[in-house]
Image (cartoon, helix red, strand yellow):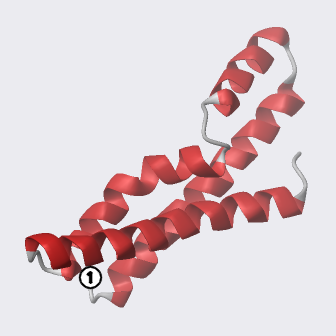
Amino acid sequence: MPTYPTLITTFFIALGVILGGSTLGSLAAFLFYQKPPHYTILDLAEKLKIWALVAALGGSFGAFRAIETSFFSGQPAEMLRQLALITSAFCGAHLGYLLLKYSLGGH
């Protein structure tokens, strides 16, 4: 299993990508396209989820390749480690989306 600091760091990187990217992106949409930030921020947060996972995992799909390799070579510990990192990144990205959604009055 990965260490707790690694899982926590991965979680917060994904959370930061969602919160920062959506907020700054909606600001840009408001300034340059006069689009309402409320709708833009949620749309961007939803679209950025996969990219938050990629950024939190190091910018590549090495984690998915490691799962494939460990699955076929019979190394379940490495597969569980990678799945824990992916889950941590996904939880951070999804929490960021939910924080934005509910802070803006979405249900």
Q: Against 48, is 79 above or below?
A: above
Q: Quadrant of the N terminus?
A: top right
Residue shown at the point (42%, 66%) measured from the top left: 21
Q: Quadrant of residue 25?
A: bottom left
Amino acid type of disc 1? Gly
Q: Quadrant of residue 75?
A: top right
Q: Nearer the viewer, residue 94 or 37?
A: 37
Q: Which element is circle 1 on?
A: loop
Q: Quadrant of the C terminus?
A: bottom left
Q: Position of residue 12 (x, y in %)?
A: 66, 68
Task: Give neighbour class at mark 1: few <14, some 14-19, many 20+ (Cα, 10 Å).
Answer: few
- Classify residue 105 as left or right of residue 15: left
Q: Against 89, is 79 above or below?
A: above
Considering every residue shown, the one lying at the far front of the view is 32
Q: Nearer the viewer, residue 22 or 31?
A: 31
Identify the residue under disc 1: 106
Q: Quadrant of residue 74?
A: top right
Residue shown at the point (81%, 40%) measured from the top left: 81
Q: Position of residue 58 (x, y in %)?
A: 67, 43
Q: Against 103, is 9 above or below?
A: above
